Image (cartoon, grey):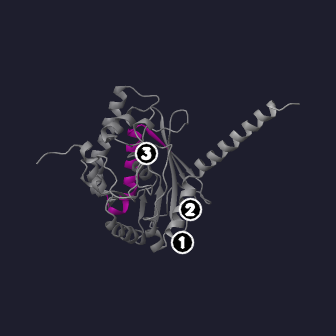
Amino acid sequence: MPVRTLDEHIEVTAPQHSWMPVSPCGAGCVQRSAEVGVLRAGARAVGALSVLAAYPFAHIVTPPARRSGVQRRFAGMLLRSCGIRLRVVDRRPVPGRPQFAPAGAGVLVACGHIGWADIIVLASVQPLAFVARADLIDWPLLGRLARIMRVVPIERERLRRLPAVVEQVGQRLAAGERIGFFPEGTTWCGRAYGKLRPAIFQAAVDTATPVQPVRLRYLDPHGNRSTVPGFVGDDTLIGSVIRVLRARGLTAEVVLAPVEPAGDDRIDLARRCERAVRAEELSDSAHAVLAAADRQLTKAAVAAPV
């Protein structure tokens, strides 16, 4: 039986139906900035592989009641090994220790999707299970981690299986689990973004589970938005990992918006979460429009006869 490579596992396929999420982002969106040397990138790779190799053993020997904390610490170590700093901004009415929900409280965490590092970033804030592409289970090494993290597999090209996924997510939310998902349905470069699809939000509506909207972005050493972690177009996992390991001064910024009550309409819930997740982008756009209008008024005033 032939052995499949990582790249073969993540081959990008054409959409199977009109509902299938599609991102226009591609290789042209990824703009590299400052990079570290090959030796430093190699040291990061060794560190990251060591963490990945050690985590399954640590999971087995840790008592179930303490595994959540172990997962968070290992996610943080893996993130640092990749050269990514974590910054959490808590904008909820009563900010406290950065976490998505109190222990034992179910919550659905909705976040925009940029690349493979997103899962590590979110798990570094608070351990989560994730709704993720079904073939992740088959990836070498990462598949084992996905099983440990109890990933909920989803095949977006098979609409008939979607109700079963929603039901499974709902059951686990009702049992008090924290589950993260990426309602855009596919990855974007980090500057452009897509709409939040409402399907999985139904699990929160069915179980009256609150939703934690999360805005995630990656910043370069100058504080500008970075597209280096974007896993888009015909990108391969190996190529994307190397690009991240070579990047200098990457920061993952996680903004915790106020929690949204589930309500009784998944479309309304998705739109409320979209407004929360995109609040800064919408604000930036408004400021840009006002600035452009101001420039036009200034030019008109200068050109007008006295």
Q: Secondary structure at mark 2?
A: helix
Tell me residue 274's x, y (percent). Answer: 54, 57
User: Above or below — where is 159 with respect to 188?
Assistant: below
Q: Secondary structure at mark 1?
A: loop
Residue labelled with disc 2:
272
Q: Quadrant of residue 182?
A: bottom left
Please tell me how crowded label 3 is: few (under 14), some (14-19), or many (20+) other residues with Cα within 10 Å: few
Tell me residue 190's x, y (percent). Answer: 48, 44
Q: Which of the two discs, 2 and 1, labels the residue nearer the N terminus?
A: 1
Q: Is residue 76 magenta?
A: yes
Please name whichever residue, 282 or 215, is drawn nearer the observer in this view of the structure: 282
User: Above or below — where is 293 with respect to 96?
Assistant: above
Please name whichever residue, 128 or 4, is drawn nearer the observer in this view of the structure: 4
Of the residues shown, which amino acid type is indicated by label 2?
Arg
Residue labelled with disc 3:
24
Residue depicted at 41% across the width and 61% down the height = 179
In the image, which residues are magenta?
Answer: 61-86
Of the residues shown, which amino acid type is indicated by label 3?
Pro
Q: Residue furthest left?
A: 1
Cα gap from disc 2 to disc 1, whole angstroms: 11 Å
Q: Secondary structure at mark 3?
A: loop
User: Above or below — where is 108 with respect to 77?
Assistant: below
Of the residues shown, which amino acid type is indicated by label 1?
Gly
Residue depicted at 41% across the width and 52% down the height = 123
Q: Can you see residue 227?
A: yes
Residue labelled with disc 1:
263
